[in-house]
Image (tube, rainbow, N blue to C red):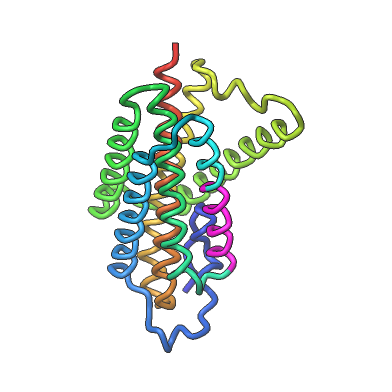
Amino acid sequence: MRYRETSNPLLREGVFLARSGGAAEGAMTVQGTWNRVGILFALTAAAALFSWTFPYGDMRGLGSKLALFTVAGFVLALATVFRRDWAPYTAPAYAVAEGLVMGSLSRLFDLAYPGIVVQAVALTLGIFGSLFLLYRFQILKVSDRMRRAVAAATMGICLVYLVGMVMRLCGGNGLGFLHQPTPFSILFSLFVVAVAAFNLVISFDFIDQVARLGAPRHMEWYAAFGLIVGLIWLYVEVLNLLAKLRRD
């Protein structure tokens, strides 16, 4: 049987094919994976709350801590991706690092747009919960056409973001028009939020399928890590969309 694909690069077909030591450690289960998702979510939320309430002193201190936490999260994410058997250790550390990033980033947004973080958190959790229920009750079903469409859209968004990053590194302002409160920019953000949300749906389906095939148990942590990455992406995009809507 073939592993089903997902557009989430952290949960793609090939990552579950390495099964060395799988028989000794036992098999991955759907329930076990969701237990790990709960643990990682709790760590992310606790770290975000700590970062949000930490007395930085000034905006420069807040910005420097945000940069430090971002680098730490990126390194831990790479370690998890390239050494999947490390996921039981690196995934919780990543959740803490990204929680610190989310707390600091959220505080910056809330200073500019008071109340925006509560709205973003509520919308993100609402979208996540609604999509999970729609998937679980088989109202929303994942098809091969959906997988291909979401994969193509995700790659396109990544390319747009990469071009903007390269332009900034070269001394330009990147794709600044995408960050302005214009109708086109808002529509683009709505599109990105939708793609991020459907990535989660495809990941739900992928976990179900792979668990049935008996992937090694440490992959529960890796799959949970992938879902947390997707959830964080969704939150950031919702936050960005709300910020555009709040600008004059």
The stretch in magenta equals: 69-82
Q: Position of residue 66 (x, y in %)?
A: 51, 41
Q: Residue at x 59, y 45 (%)?
A: 155
Q: Residue furthest right?
A: 170
Residue 183 lies, in percent from the top left, at: 49, 16
Q: Position of residue 169 (x, y in %)?
A: 72, 35
Against 179, residue 139 (above or below) is: below
Whether residue 190 can be seen here: no
Nearer the observer, 142 or 198: 198
The residue closer to the viewer here, 109 or 30, is 109
Residue sitting farthest toward the front: 57
State the residue at coordinates (45%, 29%): 240
Instruction: Please provide percent x and percent y for residue 232.
Output: 42, 45
When asked about the image quadrant of residue 152, the answer is top right
Q: Front-most of 50 and 44?
A: 50
- The answer to whether residue 72 is magenta is yes
User: Who's the residue at 42% across and 42% down the image?
Assistant: 102
- The quadrant of the image that shows the C terminus is top left
Give the left or right position of residue 247, taking residue 126 as reference.
Answer: right
